[in-house]
Image (spheres, rainbow, N blue to C red):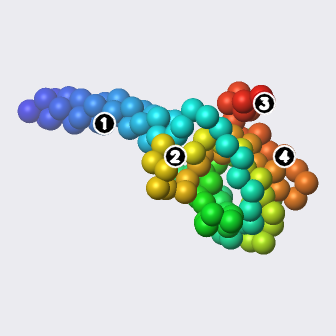
Amino acid sequence: MKHSLRMGLAGLALSALAGAPIAALAHHGWSWAESEQMTLQGTVQQLQIAPPHPWLDVQTDAGIWRVELGNPTQTKKAGFVEGSAKPGDAVTAIGNRDRDSAKKRMKAVQIKVGGKTYDIYPSRIQKP
């Protein structure tokens, strides 16, 4: 009985682990974003560098936009760390807007703040 219980629990654990990457891919994918890229300019209102996704709230002429960055490791690898931006800083974000035009949200591939450029997703930056 102990052996079959252990096997059942092991199977359950493996099933849960096998499903985790799929859920993570669905959450972290790009399917929610338009394929065309846009440029957004404004002022940092608020930011978070912590998991699950670093983000900036950016005040623009059209209102406040949520600018999502890469996962924390990727964002740090791009050089964007705690202190790279603060409320009041001017920012330019290049990225892909949410397909739902009612949402003011974008996934940034590159941001510029304080005279520095951070390539969050270098391979996704579209050349003009």
Task: Name the residue that disc number 4 marks.
Answer: 117
Task: Name the residue that disc number 2 marks.
Answer: 98
Tell me if mark 3 has few (under 14), some (14-19) or many (20+) residues whose alpha carbon lies within 10 angstroms of its own: few
Alpha carbons under labels 4 and 3: distance apart:
17 Å
Tell me if mark 1 has few (under 14), some (14-19) or many (20+) residues whose alpha carbon lies within 10 angstroms of its own: few
Alpha carbons under labels 4 and 2: distance apart:
23 Å
User: Counting residues from the N terminus, which is met first, the one under dot 4 or under dot 2?
Assistant: 2
**Which quadrant of the figure has residue 81?**
bottom right
Tell me the residue at 54%/37% (across/down).
34
Q: Is residue 95 above or below residue 48?
A: above
Tell me the residue at 59%/49% (across/down).
106
Tell me if mark 4 has few (under 14), some (14-19) or many (20+) residues whose alpha carbon lies within 10 angstroms of its own: some
Q: Secondary structure at mark 4?
A: strand
Alpha carbons under labels 1 and 3: distance apart:
43 Å
User: Counting residues from the N terminus, which is met first, the one under dot 4 or under dot 3?
Assistant: 4
Q: For the residues labelled 3 and 2, say whether their Cβ atoms are less than 8 Å apart.
A: no
Q: Secondary structure at mark 1?
A: helix
Task: Name the residue that disc number 1 marks.
Answer: 16
Alpha carbons under labels 2 and 1: distance apart:
30 Å
Q: Is residue 108 above or below residue 10?
A: below
Residue type marked 3 = Pro
Q: Secondary structure at mark 2?
A: strand
Tell me the residue at 52%/46% (across/down).
98
Query: Residue 48's spot in the image, x, y percent?
Result: 63, 62
